[in-house]
Every structure is written in C-alpha cells, then in structure tokens.
Image (tube, rainbow, N blue to C red):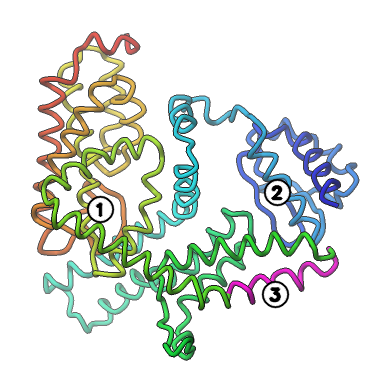
C-alpha cells in the first residue's frame, strides 16, 4: 500500500509541474490542496484521469480529491517527494544569495531551529497585533488617560490578552502540521497542557498545574502526537483510519504529556529562563554587546524566529522579556550603517536601494537592508553588527524589557515596560549612531559598490 501511495503521489507531483512549481500544500479530510506557482504548468485533464484521483477542483487552490484515509497517506508521500527532490524554486531566484546561505547552514541543529521557526512564523501577525494592543492599553492606563476599571480598559485588555491565554492551542496546531500530523490533533495537544481541568489530576502524589511546561511542553506534545499519528496510520485500514488513528494518537499523547512532557517542559523552561537571566546578570554589558552583535548573522540564516518560544517563556516566567530589546539593536545598527553608506556613496542605484529599504529597517523589517545592501557589500555588515553590540550593551546595563513579543525597531517602543520607554529609544539612537560611525570610518568605500554601477 505504501508503494501504491508513493506512485500516486509521484504521478500527482509530475502533473502539477514538479516540485519547483509547488508553493505550498496541505490536506483536509478528503482533499490534497496544492498552491502551484504557475497554474499553466498544471495538467488538469490528466490529473482527472489518474487512477486513485476521485476528482479535481480548481478554486483558490488546486484541490485533488482522494478520499478519507487515502489523502493522509498520499499527502505524506507527496510531502516527502517535495522535500527531497532537488528543485529550483521559481520564487527564490530573486533571493539566491539567501538560499545559498541557508544551504550552507543546513546542520541538523539548524534544521531543527528552522522547523521551530516555521511553527512560530505564521503566528507573528497575531503576536504583533496582540502585543501592540496590550502595550498601548497598559500605557494609556498607567498614564491615567483611561481608568483601570473602565469598560474601555477591560475591552482593550481582553482583545490584547486573548492570544496569550490560548497560544498553546495555536502552537500545538502548527507543531503537529510542521512535523507531518493533523493540525486539529496538534491543537488538542496544546489543550492537554493549558486546560484548567488539569488541576484535578494528581500523579505520584503531586497535583498537576495547568500550563506547567509552557510552550516547550506544548511543542513536545504537538510533535509527539504527529509522530504517533503517522506511525499508527501505517497499520490501520483506510476505512477505519478516521476513527482509530486520531483516538489512539490523542490517548497516548495525553498519557505521555501528563507523565513526561509537562514536568520535562517545566524543567527545560526553567533552565532556559534561569540560564539567560544568569548570563545577563553576570555578563552585564559584555553579554549585551555579544548578544546584540551576533543577532544579525542569526537573521541571515533565518534562525532568529526559533528564539520566539524563548521570548515567550521569559514573559511567562518573569513577566517581561529583557532579551528582545538587546536583540532589537541588530536592526538598529544596520540602519545606522545604511545611513553612512547613503551619505558616502555617489552611486545613484545604491542610494535608491537604501532609500527604499531604510523605512522598513527602522520599522523592524531588516531583510531588505541585509540582503540588498550590507551583506553584499561585506564590511558594512560587520560594522553594523558592532553598532548593534553597543546598543545591546546599553539595553543590558539598564535592564530594559518588553511585556510582549513583536516587531523590533521603533514599533517595539509600544511593548517596552512603561518606565523604560525613554531608555529603549536612547539605546536605539545609540545603535544608529554607532553603526553610522563604524561604517563611515571603517566599513565602506565607494569602490566596494561596483555592482551598483
């Protein structure tokens, strides 16, 4: 049966234009849903004639109807083929430098971090929106503009805080999906940990605490339920798959979660939190400099999103996050470097590139400046990191922290603890200035920008 599913998946992949034409894919109860890059490359007529394909529907996505049970197995084989066949992604041609860097950094540990990044990247808009609303509502309340017990304050608090109460469900959903399982079962894995009813469970003489293990526990449970689901499905007849597979997966995951994942996740979370706080307490400005200066290389590899659960665990454990303001200086140092290049260069193309990328850089989106300006030029990337280190040292010295996770740069101001906003802005300015000075004096000569002639 596995061979039959593999053959069908390969046939479908060929008829949709190959791996290089697959932008994304997922599956529901009966359909394999594919988003092709170029719809002209899809052979819809041959797909409909393919044995094992019940039907084809073309809407926002290409929906290939395979039937319950069958779709899970074919989708898994399809994903294996897409991930293993060497391909040239049509959309990545414009970002070949970034792809080359990612390939060089494809160690098992970094691949795991990329998996974790893929779990949290889809949540970034929700985290940013909720964080900003939470930050703004706290600021207006503490400023005395809105009474804490007013209906407006309550509404803002509910809107901004809802995500963080149920974040485990979304993380579990994405974790299961990323590791090849059903998103709905991953959501259940998250519920296993955050469910208030957990307080009624006593194991080994101790009552469980809802939320124990935090997002680390949710990640473990979400990955585990995907693993169990895939293993069980291999031995279950397709006609019974929808009944037996999810039931066994949930039952086993629930038992293992309460016995293993919640206490283990708690230990890991406490270790991460205490370790980072110790580094900042002992290392002080030196630790701040190193963390700030090394963040841009992490962004280059795309691994920086893997730190999202660390930020969230710090907020969950101690109430705020002293790491994010330090790392946010990475983008600020680069903005300063870009300003220096803009001032020194006489090349109009380079000035236009910087002018187009600077606004997004100041708003916390650093990739346009990284891959369009500083990294191709080489030395300015290093001087930008040095500028970031100076700002990181400042943030560490004054223990500036945020109350939520969000975009860095100027927008992060709304998430900084109310009494530390001015300090954060001063640190941001210091990074701008340091990045500018290092780059202007040591990082750039106009002959370095030959490709912009």
The image's mark for residue 59 is 2
Callout 3 touching callout 1 (CB < 8 Å): no
Residue wearing tag 1: 324
Front-most of 438 and 237? 237
Callout 3 touching callout 2 (CB < 8 Å): no
Label 2: which secondary element: loop
Q: Which residues are magenta?
A: 238-253
Q: Residues under labels 1 and 2: Cα distance?
A: 41 Å
Asked whether 72 falls inside the magenta stretch, the response is no
The image's mark for residue 247 is 3
Q: Earlier in the sequence, mark 1 or mark 2?
A: 2
Residue at image point 27% right, 44% down: 363
Question: For the view shown, which residue lies furthest in the front direction?
Answer: 204
- Please tell me whether residue 273 is drawn above or below residue 197 in the rendered image: above
Q: Earlier in the sequence, mark 3 or mark 2?
A: 2
User: Badge 3: few (under 14), some or many (20 or more) residues near its Cα, within 10 Å?
Assistant: some
Q: Image quarter for residue 39?
A: top right
User: Badge 1: few (under 14), some or many (20 or more) residues near its Cα, within 10 Å?
Assistant: many
Residue at image point 68% right, 43% down: 80
């Amino acid at each position: 049966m596995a061979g039959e599913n593999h053959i069908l998946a390969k046939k479908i992949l060929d008829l949709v234009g190959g791996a290089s034409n697959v932008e994304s894919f997922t599956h529901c109860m009966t359909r394999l849903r594919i988003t092709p890059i170029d719809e002209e490359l899809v052979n819809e007529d041959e797909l409909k004639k393919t044995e094992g394909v019940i039907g084809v529907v073309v809407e926002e996505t290409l929906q290939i109807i395979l039937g319950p049970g069958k779709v899970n197995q074919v989708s898994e084989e399809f994903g294996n083929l897409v991930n293993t066949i060497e391909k040239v992604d049509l959309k990545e041609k414009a970002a070949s430098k970034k792809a080359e860097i990612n390939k060089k950094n494809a160690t098992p540990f970094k691949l795991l971090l990329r998996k974790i990044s893929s779990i949290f990247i889809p949540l970034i808009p929700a985290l940013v929106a909720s964080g900003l609303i939470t930050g703004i509502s706290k600021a207006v309340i503490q400023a005395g503009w809105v009474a804490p017990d007013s209906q407006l304050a309550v509404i803002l608090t509910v809107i901004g805080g809802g995500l963080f109460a149920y974040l485990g469900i979304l993380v579990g959903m994405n974790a299961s999906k990323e590791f090849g399982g059903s998103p709905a079962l991953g959501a259940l894995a998250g519920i296993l940990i955050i469910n208030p009813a957990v307080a009624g469970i006593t194991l080994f003489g101790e009552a469980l605490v809802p939320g124990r293990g935090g997002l680390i526990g949710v990640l473990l449970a979400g990955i585990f339920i995907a693993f169990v689901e895939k293993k069980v499905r291999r031995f279950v007849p397709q006609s019974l798959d929808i009944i037996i597979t999810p039931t066994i997966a949930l039952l086993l995951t629930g038992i293992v979660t309460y016995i293993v994942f919640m206490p283990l996740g708690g230990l890991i979370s406490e270790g991460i939190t205490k370790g980072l706080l110790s580094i900042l307490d002992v290392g002080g400005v030196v630790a701040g400099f190193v963390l700030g200066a090394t963040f841009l290389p992490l962004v280059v590899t795309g691994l920086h999103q893997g730190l999202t659960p660390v930020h969230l665990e710090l907020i969950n454990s101690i109430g705020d996050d002293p790491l994010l303001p330090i790392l946010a200086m990475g983008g600020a140092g680069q903005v300063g470097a870009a300003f220096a290049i803009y001032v020194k260069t006489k090349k109009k193309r380079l000035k236009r590139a910087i002018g187009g990328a600077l606004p997004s850089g100041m708003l916390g989106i650093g990739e346009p400046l990284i891959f369009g300006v500083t990294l191709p030029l080489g030395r300015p990337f290093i001087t930008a990191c040095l500028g970031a280190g100076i700002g990181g040292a400042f943030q560490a010295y004054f223990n500036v922290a945020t109350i939520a996770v969000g975009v860095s740069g100027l927008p992060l101001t709304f998430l900084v603890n109310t009494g530390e906003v001015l300090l954060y802005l001063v640190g941001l300015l210091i990074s701008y200035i340091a990045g500018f000075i290092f780059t202007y004096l040591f990082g750039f000569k106009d002959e370095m920008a030959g490709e912009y002639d």
